[in-house]
Image: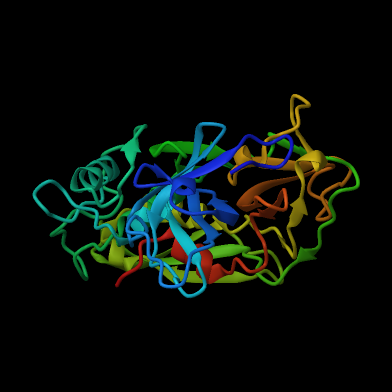
Amino acid sequence: MPNRPGEPDLEVYIGGQPLSTIAAWGDAEITHGRNGPIAATWGMALKPKERPYQLVRNAPVTWRSGGRRISFGILDEPDWDAGEFTMIGGARLGEGAEPLTAAGAITSKLNTAIDQAVARGVTRGWFRGGDFGNTDLAGPEGASGVDDPNPGKLNELMDLWATQGSVGGVTRQWRVTGDGLVVPTVEDESTPQLLLLPGTTSIGVSGTEVTDRVFLRYNDSAATRLRTASYPAQTPIGGIERRASIVHLGPMTAARATTIAEGMYRRAQAGRTGWTNGWELSADQMTTVGGQRPSLALVRAGVTAQAMDQPDPRGVSPALNVVLDETTWRVAEGLIQLNPVGLVARTWEQVMAEALARDE
């Protein structure tokens, strides 16, 4: 598909075959989250009752810009009547996968869980490209306690790994690249990688989902009883306190429970207010740190963007730096939607769901 001036040609492949050889397509939108490809949608001009055999649920989908692979996933159920198609992004493929050992036992050792999901083929296109460690993130199966530990699905276990490492001002993250590599990474709000040019941005502040302190109910491995951990140590006057239970993760030390509480606190904006809006921009309204016009195909969530002429309206910094939570590239329009971490729609319940393995 020929792209707008300044952007390489874009092509999507279904099962390895260029979609343009099957039928005309367009109106593409490609969405990335902090963990990698989330979704893509496009339309096709098909004849009445035309059903190309390649377009079946779970068919592998790959997007390339100028020959470079930028996103991948699997095809969702086609909407033949509307001629609309949706890809489930590669970063979501672990949502249905169980964290298992080669013998089929539940595990909370992340290297093992990822490797075995890849071996089973349930996370099609994934390849572990970094070390996530092989210590138990939850209690081992069969541990004493209220219930056997339940780390949830694979993506939930990966979120738990990120939460336990988000301490000391660092936000640890896992990411699936456009090539399918599953890698550990760190988000650094203080170091911008994308500059938004003067006059292109404005942002509003919202305090509706502030989290000033986190309380967690957990199963104490030393006392074999339920206890409460919290972070930070004190609540500011008039502060907003949040609570959650991690009993389903099995017995753990007070130190680990406090680490999880700190990780949840930091992933919930660390006591800071959130934002009411993101930005829809063209490539001409931003640059790389080196002063280059970026390709919108390569502008991804998880990087830090700086609004060059706007101080942080919360008063915490002379410059507005935000980590991008989600990006959606509207290919035909030549625009990209940039949504920052802390957008008001991201509630405390969403933070909990991302940070912890849920007991199902």
Quadrant location of the N terminus in the rendered image: top right
Report the side of 156 relative to 300 (left or right): left
Q: Answer with left or right where residue 205 lies relative to residue 188.
A: right
Looking at the image, which residue is at 49% across and 64% down?
A: 46
Q: How is the image coloured?
A: rainbow
Tell me which residue sits at (82%, 42%) in the image: 285
Residue occupying the point 61% across, 40% down: 297
Rendered position, 261 above or below 2: below
Q: Quadrant of the C terminus?
A: bottom left
Q: Where is residue 286, by image quadrant?
A: top right
Q: Position of residue 244 (x, y in %)?
A: 45, 70
In the figure, 102 relative to 215: above or below?
above
Q: Residue furthest left?
A: 103
Of residues 89 and 111, which is closer to you in this image? 89
Q: Nearer the viewer, residue 295 or 109?
A: 295
Viewer-closest of 153 and 136? 153
What residue is shown at x 38% (from left), y 67% (from top)?
A: 77
User: Quick check: can you spot residue 86?
Assistant: yes
Q: Is residue 90 visible?
A: no
- Horizontally, is 143 left or right of 274 in the view? left
Image coordinates of residue 200 in percent, x first then y, are 86, 48
Depth check: give the residue in front, 339 or 336. Answer: 336
Q: Looking at the image, which residue sits at the far front?
A: 47
